[in-house]
Image (cartoon, coloured by chain):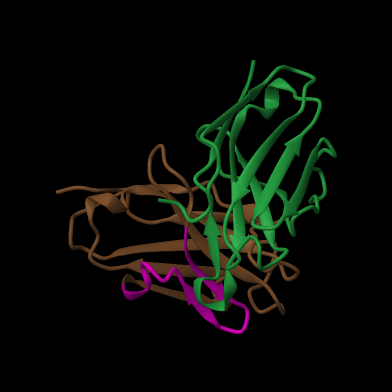
Chain colours: A brown, B green
C-alpha cells in the first residue's frame, strides 16, 4: 500500500525559503522508473506541477519556477524534500507530493493529502 | 493562465453522459499519447482516473473513458452518478524540457 504525506511550515513570510518534506511508504525510490513529484494548488485555482525527481536522481523542474526550486531525495529515509526560495503571497497554495509509477511518463497514481502553505507577513 | 484549456463547467443529469474537453498544442496533447485525467472532490487530493489517453487504473469504473483527436483530449463519463460531481483536471506530457502541464480544471455538476 503506497502512502505519501507532506510536512512543513503552514506559514512563511515573504522572501523566506520554504522547505517541504514528503515522507512515503509502500515503494522505494531506488526502484527503476519510479519518481516523486510536487504539485501545488492555490486556493480555488488549478493544479500546477513544480518538480519531479526520479529513481536515478534525475531532476526536472517547471521552467517558470526552475530558478527557485530544488528537489532532493533521501532513499534511506523514504523522503523527498522540496525547497522554494523567495516566497511570495502568490505562492500561497496547498502543496502535494505524488508517486510517479514506473510505467508512467507524466502521471501520478498516488497523492499525499496535501499541506496548505500561507505566505504572509 | 493554464497551458491546457478546459471548459470551466459542465453539467448533466444522473444517468446521462458528459464529455469534458482538454485542448492543447502539438507540443503537448497532440504530440504524445500521454494525457491523464484527475478527479478532485472538495478538500481532497486529486485521484488519477485515466492515463495514457484511455487507460484506467485499477478500481476506476468503466463509466470513465478517455480519447484524443489531434490537439484535443476528452474525458467521457457515462451513466452519471451523484458521486461524480467534482473538479476534473487534464494533464499532458509536454516533452523533456517542460515535462508536463495541467489544464485549468472543469467543475462537473450532477443536476
Task: Give the left or right position of residue B58, taking residue A92 as reference.
Answer: right
Q: Residue furthest right?
A: B62
Q: Residue furthest left?
A: A121
Which is more toward the observer, A63 or A30?
A: A63
Which is more toward the observer, B24 or B42?
A: B24
Residue A88 pos. (x, y %) = 23, 56
Placement of B101 over or under A60, stated as above or below: above
Tag count in the figure?
0
Placement of B28 over or under B103, stated as above or below: below
Residue A20 pos. (x, y %) = 40, 61
Task: Give the left or right position of residue B59, taking residue B41 as reference.
Answer: right
Residue A65 pos. (x, y %) = 36, 68
Residue at the (55%, 82%) spot, across then down: A58
Placement of A57 over or under B84, stated as above or below: below
Q: Quadrant of residue A110?
A: bottom right
> Is residue A53 inside the magenta stretch?
yes
Residue B56 pos. (x, y %) = 80, 50
Residue at the (75%, 25%) spot, across then down: B80
> Is residue B82 inside the magenta stretch?
no
Residue at the (31%, 48%) spot, across then down: A92
Residue at the (31%, 53%) spot, across then down: A91
Magenta segment range? A49-67
Tell me the quarter of the image containing the N terminus of chain A: bottom right
Amino acid at each position: 500500500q503506497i502512502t505519501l504525506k507532506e510536512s512543513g511550515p503552514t506559514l512563511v513570510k515573504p522572501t523566506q525559503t520554504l522547505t517541504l518534506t514528503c515522507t512515503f511508504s509502500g515503494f522505494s525510490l531506488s526502484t527503476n522508473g519510479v519518481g516523486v513529484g510536487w504539485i501545488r494548488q492555490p486556493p480555488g485555482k488549478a493544479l500546477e506541477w513544480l518538480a519531479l525527481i526520479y529513481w536515478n536522481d534525475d531532476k526536472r523542474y517547471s521552467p517558470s519556477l526552475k530558478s527557485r526550486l530544488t528537489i532532493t531525495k533521501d532513499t534511506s529515509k523514504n523522503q523527498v524534500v522540496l525547497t522554494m526560495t523567495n516566497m511570495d503571497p502568490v505562492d500561497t497554495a496547498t502543496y502535494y507530493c505524488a508517486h510517479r509509477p514506473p510505467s508512467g511518463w507524466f502521471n501520478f497514481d498516488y497523492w499525499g493529502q496535501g499541506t496548505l502553505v500561507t505566505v504572509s507577513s | 493562465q493554464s497551458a491546457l484549456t478546459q471548459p470551466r463547467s459542465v453539467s448533466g443529469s444522473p444517468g446521462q453522459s458528459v464529455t469534458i474537453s482538454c485542448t492543447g498544442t502539438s507540443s503537448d496533447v497532440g504530440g504524445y499519447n500521454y494525457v491523464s485525467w484527475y478527479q478532485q472532490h472538495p478538500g481532497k487530493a486529486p485521484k488519477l482516473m485515466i492515463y495514457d489517453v484511455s487507460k484506467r487504473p485499477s478500481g476506476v469504473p468503466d463509466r470513465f473513458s478517455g480519447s484524443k483527436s489531434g490537439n484535443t483530449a476528452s474525458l467521457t463519463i457515462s451513466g452519471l452518478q451523484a458521486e461524480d460531481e467534482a473538479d476534473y483536471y487534464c494533464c499532458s506530457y509536454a516533452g523533456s524540457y517542460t515535462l508536463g502541464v495541467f489544464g485549468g480544471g472543469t467543475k462537473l455538476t450532477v443536476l
